[in-house]
């Protein structure tokens, strides 16, 4: 038997020590370790500020041939080049 509406719709409870969010039910309301919280506090991911919603990607995510070729990994350095980089700034 499925229960469509468990608890009181629109009301949410948060456990004070654990932080777990529960639907509001009469049994849970009587528990002294829970407090009623707003929908914004219960589900912050659903209430993201407009400032954060429209962030642009730092990388070029297009699939153009030129962009893909440009973004490919550079050729690996040889042992001599690695040794030269590692010894930079050391006295000879």
Image (spheres, grey):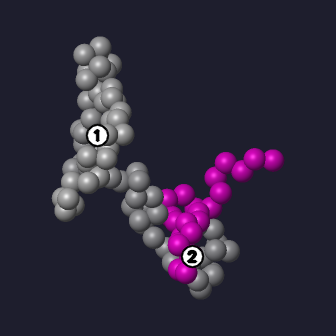
Residue at the spot 49% in from the left edge and 73% down from the top edge: 36
Q: Is residue 61 visible?
A: no
Span colored in magenta:
1-23
Question: First in sequence: mark 2 or mark 1?
Answer: 2
Q: Which residue is mark 1?
A: 81
Q: Is residue 1 visible?
A: yes
Q: Looking at the rendering, which quadrant does residue 61 occupy?
A: top left
Badge 2 density bin: few <14, some 14–19, many ≥20, Cα 10 Å: few
Which of discs 2 and 1 lies nearer the camera? The answer is 1
Q: Contact (CB < 8 A) between labels 2 and 1?
A: no
Quadrant placement of the C terminus: bottom left
Of residues 88 and 18, the one drawn nearer to the viewer in this rendering? 88
Q: Secondary structure at mark 2?
A: loop
Image position of 10 (left or right of 83): right
Residue at the spot 29% in from the left edge and 14% down from the top edge: 65
Q: Secondary structure at mark 1?
A: helix
From this viewpoint, which residue is outermost toward the right? 1
Mark 2–mark 1 distance (CA, rounded to whole Å): 54 Å
Q: Confirm whether the magenta stretch covers residue 35.
A: no
Of residues 85 and 14, the one drawn nearer to the viewer in this rendering? 85
Residue at the spot 62% in from the left edge and 61% down from the top edge: 7
Whole-percent x and y of residue 67? Answer: 26, 21
Whole-percent x and y of residue 26? Answer: 64, 72
Q: Which residue is mark 2?
A: 18
Tag shown at residue 48: none
From this viewpoint, which residue is outermost toward the bottom? 32
């Amino acid at each position: 038997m499925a229960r469509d509406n468990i608890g009181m719709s629109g009301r949410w409870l948060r456990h004070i020590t654990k932080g777990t969010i529960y639907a509001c039910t009469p049994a849970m309301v009587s528990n002294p370790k829970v407090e009623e919280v707003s929908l914004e506090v219960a589900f912050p991911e659903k209430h993201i500020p407009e400032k954060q919603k429209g962030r642009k990607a730092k990388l070029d995510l297009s699939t153009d041939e030129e962009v893909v070729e440009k973004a490919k990994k550079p050729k690996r350095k040889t042992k001599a080049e690695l040794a030269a980089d590692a010894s930079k700034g050391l006295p000879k």
